Amino acid sequence: MHSFSYVDGTLRCEGVDLGEIADRFATPAYVYSSATIRSNYRRLDAALAPLDHLLCYAVKANSNLAVLNLLSKLGSGFDIVSAGELFRVLKAGGRADRCTFAGVGKTREEIAFALREGVYSFNVESEGELTRINEVAGSLGLKAPVAIRVNPDVDAKTHKFISTGKSKNKFGIGIDRAAEVYQVAAGLPHLKIRGVQTHIGSQILEASPFAEAAEKLAALVRDLKQAYDIEFFDFGGGIGIVYDEALESGSPAWWEAHGSSTQRITPEDYAAAIIPVLKPLGLRILFEPGRFLVGNAGALLSTVQYVKQTPAKTFTIIDAAMNDLIRPALYEGWHEIVPLRQSTNEKTVMDVVGPVCESGDFFAQDRPLAPLHPDDRVAVLSSGAYGFVMSSNYNSRPLLPEILVDGEKFHLARERQSLEDLVRGESIPE
Ligand code: LLP
């Protein structure tokens, strides 16, 4: 569900005309809908209500302080993967004791910072990390709460770059070795075993891989519960969203027509697949949704610069680029592109590309879209997750502003970088 729709031919985010945002802050710019984030959070939270559960928003999906603050006010915990993400959560008013700290490469400094702040759990990915956390905790006179990330060897049926739960992936401890590694943890004096964690991948559109992972893990968790003081099972994130037909998918009628298809997982499908397996565990269940909460809540606004006709193709060149949204280039991600002002039902086949000097710098290829002209403005939809956070200064392009809409109001949640910002901290030797 989301809050982007046309009113009298003009694209709006909630009660705000996106043309007004583009006039005010210029393009390219990211816009997020508070109502969408709230409604996604509440819908998932309600679907999982039969479980004693906590949603720990995966900060990596969108770490703007305003977004984190909104989620924190809804009661969300946070899944963090770096000291930087913990710092952001705290700045945004979030609580460390509702944070799980994941990631295969935690440094000593990051571990110490998280221990001092009192994170709820370290999700541990290797024996080396267990030893390191034990040492750092010992040196600070603290006990570190840990969960071991277990890799269930399940095929998440998603893009290979974002599949994490196969035994060939770098993540977690293989399920057949998990019991042994828990024993190692139990022997380390500055650790407190608190839970079990897993995460099989991202943009998963079917319920079956989740059900399979839940079943595989449930048996292990039951055994571990006999031996240790296990308080929670963290089931990770990964619920996929609709990218094609993104605009239509905002309406309840669309979901009625398409919602039950296996390719469009809903929070209710997800809950139905796992609750019967997870509830009998009698534990607190954590979830780490990222994309589901914020993906459809974001749009990247951009202005057409040129339309270039070659014998092979029509290239519509816009002012946003792969450095602003890398998903098409990196994962062949498909994002719906719509004009801010609807004009005609006519379509022409085009490539929508950015100004960066790479052929991978595209937003759409061979796509039928309403004809676009220089100065027309477009929205690249469903870019609220893994959009701004993965952007870079490549080609010395300043990072974009982020605007959070709430009803009729909007707030500049991050300023556009200036040219001076681009060189801040750099110097030339004497
Ligand atoms: N928990 C862990 C341990 C994760 O690694 C991730 C995502 C999540 C939770 C959240 O997953 P989500 O609910 O958002 O699917 N940049 C890629 C996605 C990378 C996902 C990385 N891990 C993309 O744009 O598709």
Image: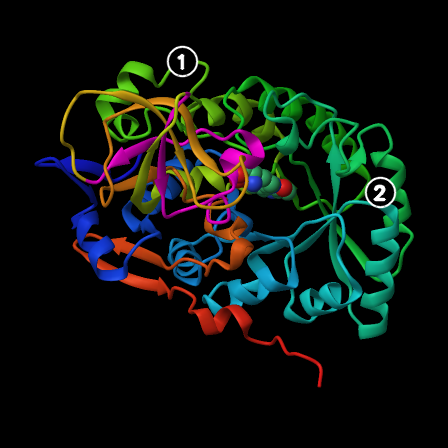
Where's the C terminus, which quadrant? bottom right
Based on the picture, tell me whether residue 331 belongs to the magenta stretch. yes
Q: Is residue 303 left or right of residue 121?
A: left
The spot of residue 241 in percent (x, y) is: 43, 30
The amino acid type found where label 1 is placed reads Ser
Note whether 277 is above or below 397 in the view shown: above
Residue 377: percent from the left, percent from the top? 25, 43
Question: Which circle marks residue 284 in the picture?
Answer: none
Residue 194's spot in the image, x, y percent?
72, 50
**Label 1 belongs to which residue?**
261
Which quadrant of the view contains residue 98? bottom right
Q: Residue at x 26, y 26 (%)?
A: 248
Q: Which residues are magenta?
A: 312-340
Tell whether position 40 is magenta: no
The answer to whether 127 appears left or right of 219 in the picture is right
Percent from the top left, x then y, of residue 12?
A: 19, 43
User: Image check: 305 left or right of 312?
Assistant: left
| Amino acid type for the residue under numbered disc 2 | Tyr
Q: Which residue is mark 2?
A: 182
Q: Which residue occupies 76% across, 52% down?
A: 105
- Ligand 1 shows up in which quadrant of the image? top right
Q: Which of these two is toward me, 135 or 280?
A: 135
In front: label 1 or label 2: 1
